[in-house]
Image: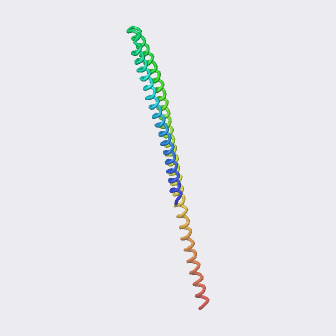
Amino acid sequence: MTVKDKIVFSILVILILAGGYFQYMSGEMIKRMDELNQNDMKHVDVVHNEFREDLRILNLQFIGRGKHLQKAQRDIVANTKFIIATADSLSDMIGEVQYNLDEVEREVFNRFADVETDIADLEGDLRRLRSKTTQTLSEIQQKLTLLETDLNNISEKVFEKDKKEKK
């Protein structure tokens, strides 16, 4: 496995881990939103049940038309205020979740930009190393050729000397 493969594999593992982390975070946010929706449904049911129960009791008691209508109007106003307060609270929570999601998105974008920069730097280093290696290999080949030439010259001289000595 080459250094380039190790680097690419390392970057891939880092990206997978980052993706897993952000998947986990979004899953947690979705669970929280589901919980908020369920709480909202419970609160709405509670408000509706309270209002209906009060209305039923008033109907049973039948306090008189004027008093009955005034009480029902006050209950409607109180329930409307409660619903508005609950909706505002939920709106604030939804805004906070949206802010967190935007923050996570910015963070992921910055991390990917950093990774891309690192990859570009590594590619440049790899190109320089490849060029240097090619140049060194070329120099070694030239020296090897010179050594072979010198060895052949020495061999020829030794061969000629042996020939002369035999004669």
Question: Image check: 77 left or right of 145?
Answer: left
Which of the two residues, 4 or 10, is positioned nearer the viewer here? 10
Q: Position of residue 39 (x, y in %)?
A: 47, 30
**Residue 96 in view of the camera:** yes
Camera sees residue 120: no
Depth check, front residue: 133 or 46: 46
Report the residue that reaches farthest toward the bottom.
167
Name the residue nearer the viewer: 19 or 131. 19
| Left or right: 153 as drawn, with respect to 67 | right
Q: Work out which quarter of the rendered image holds the C terminus and state it.
A: bottom right
Q: Is residue 1 left or right of residue 66?
A: right
Residue 156 image offset from top left, x and y in percent: 56, 81
Up-down relation of residue 33 to residue 79 (above or below): below
Identify the residue at horizontal 48%, vertical 28% (top origin): 93
The residue sitting at 47% across, 21% down in the picture is 85
Rendering coords of residue 133 (x, y %): 54, 60
100 to 118, vertically: above or below: above
Q: Nearer the viewer, residue 86 or 9?
A: 86
Residue 60 lies, in percent from the top left, at 40, 16
The number of discs equals 0
Which residue lies most toward the top here? Answer: 66
| Colour option used | rainbow
Residue at the outermost right position: 165
